[in-house]
Amino acid sequence: MNSPWPLDLAPPPATASGVCGQPVAHESAAAHVSAQAHYLDDGPLPAGTLHAAPVLSPVAHGRLRAIDACAALQQPGVRAVVTAADIPGDALLASFAHDEPILARDEVLYAGQVVALVVADDERSARAAARAVTLDIEPLPAVLDVWQAQAQQHWVLPPVHLCRGDARAALAAAPKRLRGRFVAGGQEHYYLETQAALAIPQEQDEWLVLSSTQHPGEVQHWVASALGLARHRVRVQCRRMGGGFGGKETQAGHVAVWAALAAHRVGAPVKLRLTREDDMRITGKRHPFAFAYDVGFDAEGRLQALELTMLVDCGFSADLSGPVADRAVFHADNAYFIPHVALHSYRCRTHKQSFTAFRGFGGPQGMLAIETILGDVARHLGRDALQVRQANLYSDEPVSAWPAALPPGAHPLPARRNTTPYQMQVEDNILQPLLQTLAQRCRYEPRRAAIAAFNATSPVLQRGLALTPVKFGISFTATLFNQAGALVHVYTDGSVLVHHGGTEMGQGLHTKVLQIVADELGVPLASVRIASSDSGIIPNASATAASSGTDLNGRAAQRAAASVRQNLAAFVAGLDGCAAGEVRFEAGWVLSPRQRRRFEAVVAEAYANRIPLWSQGFYRTPKIHYDKATLTGRPFYYFAYGAACTEVVIDTLTGELRVLAVDVLHDVGHSINPALDIGQIEGGFVQGMGWLTTEELVWDEQGRLWTAGASTYKIPTAGDLPPHWRIELWPQRNPEDNVLGSKAVGEPPFMLALSVWEAIRDAVASARRRAGLPCAGPVPLDAPATPERIWRACHTA
């Protein structure tokens, strides 16, 4: 098979020890498949542990007049009912916006809001008693969609406007112009392990909280605030999660706080694990968006101006909606240069669950908008969509000067087509060669011709094809979170224990950190272990999110291990009369010009000579900065790139969809672990495909979530995978000084599934053409593209 790579690129080499760069199995893989990997619900409970269950509001908005717990308290095994009156500390969660009550007090703000907690001897008794609690709620008018919220200026945070050039003047002057509207629904995280926490009172007002969380430090903060304690009295631990996807970044804090309040009320350990239905009714999801666009372009499809309005459904509180909506603004360009742009982001308050972080963190919604727009532009011009996309990619071409004065507050046009609307230069641009390579590798042009021939003769089935790029910024947009710490302990037998601030949710972070530390010390992988994430050991750790887990924690652990290695090298150099730089650590051996020693022997001798065998490491991401007042800066350390080509077929009589083929070429830099990286690409793509096709959230007219379980909410299954699926890694290292030349891989692959969306719209446009319906421009389709929506799009004028 011919190599798909340009001649000047080569696959990344493994490091000298052969650990990094190799497809090492996940550190808990054997334990996962043998039921020895314990999750929070599997561990032994302290003596006297009680169990809690939530009492939920059935009303989307109302005045809470009374809570009648008499019937619940009379049930066997029930110990207490906890309400807002039992909170010893701050009655609001210690979130950034400080706008969310821990338990409803006077007003309920969504159907599913937790009003009280029942504490009982066992889970079943607690849940039965929770159903016996009676709530007296006076219904109030509820805002249930973003259009109503926008009309009332019902926002959780002020709107944000990012403008460059003069979009309205450029739109008026553009040779061609197109307008459109569409909606993208939310998405349930559907982690396999539901939210869970165990709160254990300790001596002297100290607390140990076991939490299934991506952010132990925030759980510590929230629990301490609710209990009215300093943070040093609360210790939070997390061994692993059964999935997170952003849903356990802030939302895990709620459950931990509720468990701690219940434990405080009864003076005993309390465990709270949500049922699947309660989890879906209580917790936040991916933000739904409504889009309206006005785009100007030339006859080649090159964009000249864009005005894009995004109405963001934030739910009843701010949670992380501000940074999510900001990232949607940052990624509304995706891979494309737009000279004149006006982006309007409205953060709408509705009486629904508070929408929260989800893989991509607003990036998918922003990128969905521009990919939809470019697909519409291509159809309007009758041009191939890939040609239009390639014509708009970032490049070093010069930009024509704008002859008129710019509106107040608008950023000036850059000199070249390599600068984002927020004024960050795209320095490591591999978009053109990556797309060209994938197009050749997947035979895009011959397949496009074959699909056109098929569609011309097929009265029922219609095929579609799309190749879309990804440019995703890596770093927390809040600069202060781009830091991490780690500890590396070497014991006298040569074994190594690593503490770092990241958390493991199945993505393989711990495995990559093990590989990094093993290589840095030159020891076998089996010699290194990772401890549970613990706020009492690594303080103030950032969330494991923003795809930065390995970038931050891996580099911090590498620096800690390097410090220990330097101590040992200096010690050996003193023994052998050589320079420390001449001492090498390889495959469990320590090599100097004079002698060869086992690593554990050197460690034992160093200990006897009182040489420190542990060290801390700290890392903060360089170069990044962002000014929220001017909406400019460099919020990202680098960009991760990728592209996917997807072919689909739809049944125009039923709306049924099948994904037939997917080809992916993705940029992970020099992969630390290709097996884990490809697994992340596979999982991210399928999850993105689910968001855009089958995963539909439905609320009724009273604001109650209908799709609250596997029977009504459909995530993709193995049967939805394409028969042809090829994933390959772009082999160029990260030009920035990231750990081992790698790039982040958690979130960027999610957006590869935009190729599925565009392929569906391509097929629908063909079906509309055969039916004699308008097809030159916007396709009347919202996401997710369910069979019902596909059918309507094929048949509705």
Image (spheres, rainbow, N blue to C red):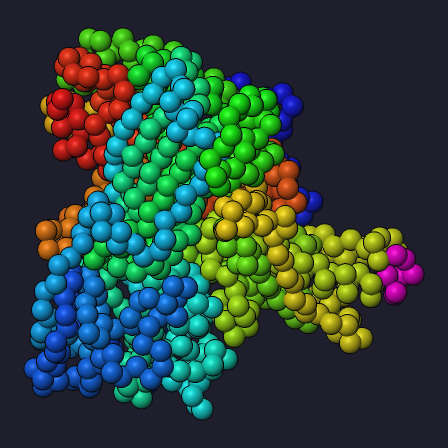
Q: For the point 9% across and 84% down, which residue is it?
A: 70
Residues in magenta?
573-579
Residue 273 at what x, y percent from top left? 27, 68
User: In screen coordinates, is 517 left or right of 723?
Assistant: right
**Side of 172 relative to 110 (left or right):** right
Q: Residue at x 88, y 65 (%)?
A: 574
Q: Can you say which quadrant of the picture contains the C terminus? A: top left
Can you give x and y, in whole percent of width and height, for residue 13 in the image? Answer: 64, 37
Q: Is residue 574 magenta?
A: yes
Picture coordinates of residue 175 (x, y %)?
A: 39, 15
Residue at (90% x, 57% y) in the render: 578
Residue projecting furthest to the right:
577
Q: Residue at x 77, y 61 (%)?
A: 566
- Judging depth in this view, the residue of 139 and 665 nearest the camera is 139
Asked whether 309 or 669 is in front, the reply is: 309
648 falls in the magenta region: no
Do we see residue 60 in this rendering? yes
